[in-house]
Structures are given as C-alpha cells and as structure tokens.
Image (cartoon, rainbow, N blue to C red):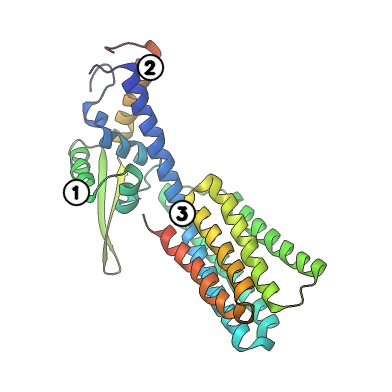
Amino acid sequence: MPADGADEIIHQPLRLRIMAALNSLPKREPLDFTRLRTSVKATDGNLGAHLGTLERAGYVEIHKDFVGKRPRTRVSISPAGRLAFARHVAFLRAVIDQGSGPP
Amino acid sequence: MEISSNQALEALEEVQDAQRRVATLRGYGYAAPYFLLWGCVWVVGFLGGYFLPAWQGRGWAGLDLAGFAGTVLIMRHQRSVAQRSLGVRTSSRTFWRILALLATAVGFLYATYAVFQPQRSAQFAVFPALLCGSIYIGIGLWRGMRWVVGGVALAAFALLGYFLLPQYMMLWMAAAGGGTLLTTGFWLSRG
C-alpha cells in the first residue's frame, strides 16, 4: 500500500466510479451488474474488464448465480476494497487541502 | 502518484456522482414492485368498471384492500431481504411512513369525492390518476427522473381520456392508466 494512500488501481476513472458506487452500499450488499453499469456509465465489456482488474487486486467480489433459469451477476466491495477506497479518497482530499501537485 | 488539486476535485465529483446514481437506481428498484402491483389493480378495476358498472363500488373497495395487502407483503419482503443482507434488524420507520403516506392519499381521495360530489364516472376515474401523477412528479424531483416521466405520463393520459374519450374512460384508464403504471414499474426495475 502506497505510503500516501494513493491507489493507482482505484484512481483510473471508471474503476474509481465502480469503487464509489459499491462503497456507497451497506456492508455485504451486492449490486446487480446491470445497475452498476448504468451507475458508472460503462459498456458491458468495459465494465467487465475493469471489474476483473479490481477482483484480481482483491477489491471486489463477483457473485454469479441464477434466478430461475436466468443467470445473474452481482458485485460487492471487499473489506480490503473499502479500506483502499477510503484511503484513496483521503489522499484526494489531502491533495485538494494542500493545493499541491503540478498544475 | 502526483495529481493536481483540480484533478483531485474532479475525481471526488465523479465519486459523488456515482454514489448519487447508485442511490437513485436502488430507489427505483425498491419502487418497481409497487408500480407493478397497482398497475394490475388499476387494469382489473377499470376493466371491471367498464364491463360491470354496478360492480364498481364493492369491486374497487375489494381491489384497494388487496392492493394494500400486497403493498404490505412487498414491504415486509424487502425489509426481510435488507435485514438478511445487513445481518441486523432494520428500522420499521420507513415501513410505517409509506403506509401512512398511502393512507393519507386514500383519505384525501375519498374526502375530495365527499366534498365535490362528482356526478360522472369519468370524474371518479380521472382524479386518482391526477393525484398519483402529481405525487410521482413531486417524488421524482428528489428521487429521479423516471418518477417524473411516469407521473407526467399518468396525468397526461388521464386528462386525454377525460376530455377526448369520456364515454370510454374506464376502458381508457385500464389501458393507459394501468398500462402506464405497469410500464413505469418495468422501467424502474431495469438498470
């Protein structure tokens, strides 16, 4: 974990939106793939690729099951993901507070 | 990682925007079953009113009771799902507030009928749609555009039927009124 809390995996714009969306849910509550896609304004393929990156980093958990005969995919943020997201948001706030960094 | 304060600000705005969108979509998901339930009630009720005019009084009373019972069942199910997901007991305040809002709307409806004494069945039919449409528009100003669109459509269809097809108002409200509720329900249930 970077010393300053910045997380390059999370900072990518779509992944940041994904983590923000999932972090806003109550603990352990997953979000349907379709609703997540609408929330973060992504295409199916794009969302799938970035979810794969976040899953490999241990930040999200992907749950696949069936509702009747229809497949369903839901995504939830992991405890490690919540911590990493909170740290990254704190980093962003610190940057704003300090007014630091290159223009 | 080095980023500017402007970039950090934009990132935080993206975070807030995503969180707002999730909250809106979750709200849609919770509301969808109620639209579907009451859409069915309206279709059956207005069709009954058209084909069996003498049935209307008792028929609507029975349908409204069934609708309330269904509403309570849906709310209990949603609360049970939320509790299983969170692993803790959730507050019943929302449950009672929604029931109180429904009771208030129905009370207002019947009080208005008692005061203004509508004479034609088309008047009885149009008023609930205008009332519900206005409520949905009001809710939508805070909870999302799909509520507003549903509310506007419901009120507009009701007025169209009242002024252009009063002799077929019951049939029109079954199709257009009940249909609008059902369509809005399906739309709310989707991502």
Question: Is the residue at mark 1 from the same chain as the one at mark 3?
Answer: no
User: Image point 35% across, 41% down: which residue?
Assistant: A22
Give the Cα distance between marks 1 and 2: 33 Å
Q: Is residue A46 left or right of residue B167?
A: left
Residue tagged by mark 1?
A: A45
Residue B87 in view here: no
- Judging by the rendered image, the residue that carries numbered circle 2 is A96
Q: Secondary structure at mark 2?
A: helix
Q: Is residue A37 left or right of residue B46?
A: left
Q: Secondary structure at mark 3?
A: helix
The subunit letter for the residue under badge 1 reads A
The residue drawn where x is 27% and y is 33% is A13
Image location of residue B148, percent across then percent down: 52, 53
Q: Chain of mark 2?
A: A
- Residue B185 picture location, percent across and down: 46, 63
Residue B92 vertical position relative to residue A87 in the rendered view, above or below: below
A48 displayed left or right of B183:
left
| Disc 3: CA contacts within 10 A as few (<14), some (14-19) or many (>=20) | many
Q: Quadrant of the N terminus of chain B?
A: top left
* Alpha-carbon span between mark 1 and mark 3: 24 Å
State the separation of the CA atoms marked 2 and 3.
Answer: 34 Å
Disc 2: CA contacts within 10 A as few (<14), some (14-19) or many (>=20): some
The residue lying toward the viewer, choosing from B184 and B169, is: B169
Q: Amino acid type of disc 3?
A: Tyr
Q: Quadrant of residue B131?
A: bottom right
Q: What number is the disc on residue B28?
A: 3
